Image: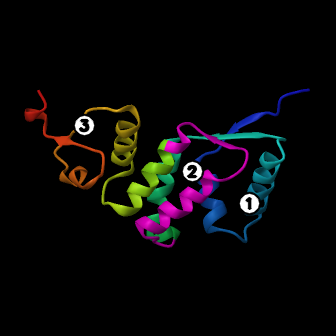
């Protein structure tokens, strides 16, 4: 049996689907997602795309969602059948942190990755890391 083709989904596809539900493009995107659910196509995306989507959803042009709302929306995207995201569990954990803290998505990914891999701590000047359970923060001068 022939393997389904694989396509990488970029930020603009997710953003169009979420912010322009009545557009013809949204119908095309829905068809793509449904095809993935039925294994007719494989879809992939990345942490970088999801991070960009978080930022875009919070912009006034996309409705100015709160951090928590944006994180919830992106978390629902992780649940799409047929969509593969490397490090899905790490991304899901980072999205929870993103909704609960003022950390950037990149910092949330770093915290989630550190916890999963048993890394000693995070070398950072950002004191918000002090509030993240399971993370020890040290400034660069005090890590050695």
Q: Earlier in the sequence, mark 1 or mark 3?
A: 1
The quarter holding residue 109 reads top left
State yes or no: residue 53 in magenta: no
x 81%, y 55%: residue: 31
Report which residue position mark 2 lands on. 11
Residue 24 or residue 75, whichever sits in front: 75
* Viewer-nearest of discs 1 and 3: 3
The quarter holding residue 19 reads bottom right
15 to 81, vertically: above or below: below
Residue 86 coordinates in the image, percent (x, y)? 56, 36
In the displayed orientation, state which residue is furthest to the left. Answer: 141
Quarter holding the C terminus? top left
107 to 53, vertically: above or below: above
Q: Secondary structure at mark 3?
A: loop
What is the spatial separation of the Cα atoms under label 1 and label 3, in whole angstroms?
Answer: 44 Å
* Viewer-nearest of discs 1 and 2: 2
Which residues, given as a range, are shown in magenta? 63-89
The quarter holding residue 21 reads bottom right
Q: Earlier in the sequence, mark 3 or mark 2?
A: 2
Report which residue position mark 1 lands on. 25
x 84%, y 41%: residue: 40
Report which residue position mark 3 lands on. 121
């Amino acid at each position: 049996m022939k393997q389904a083709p694989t396509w990488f989904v970029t930020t603009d596809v997710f953003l169009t689907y979420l912010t322009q539900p009545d557009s013809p493009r949204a119908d095309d995107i829905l068809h793509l997602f449904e095809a993935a659910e039925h294994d007719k196509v494989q879809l992939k995306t990345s942490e970088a795309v999801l991070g960009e989507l978080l930022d875009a959803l919070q912009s006034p042009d996309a409705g100015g969602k709160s951090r928590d709302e944006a994180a919830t929306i992106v978390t629902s995207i992780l649940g799409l059948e047929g969509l593969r995201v490397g490090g899905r569990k790490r991304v899901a954990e980072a999205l929870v942190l993103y909704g609960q803290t003022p950390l950037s998505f990149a910092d949330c990914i770093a915290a989630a990755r550190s916890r999963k891999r048993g890394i000693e701590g995070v070398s950072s000047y950002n004191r918000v890391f002090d509030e993240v359970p399971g993370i020890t923060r040290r400034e660069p001068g005090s890590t050695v």
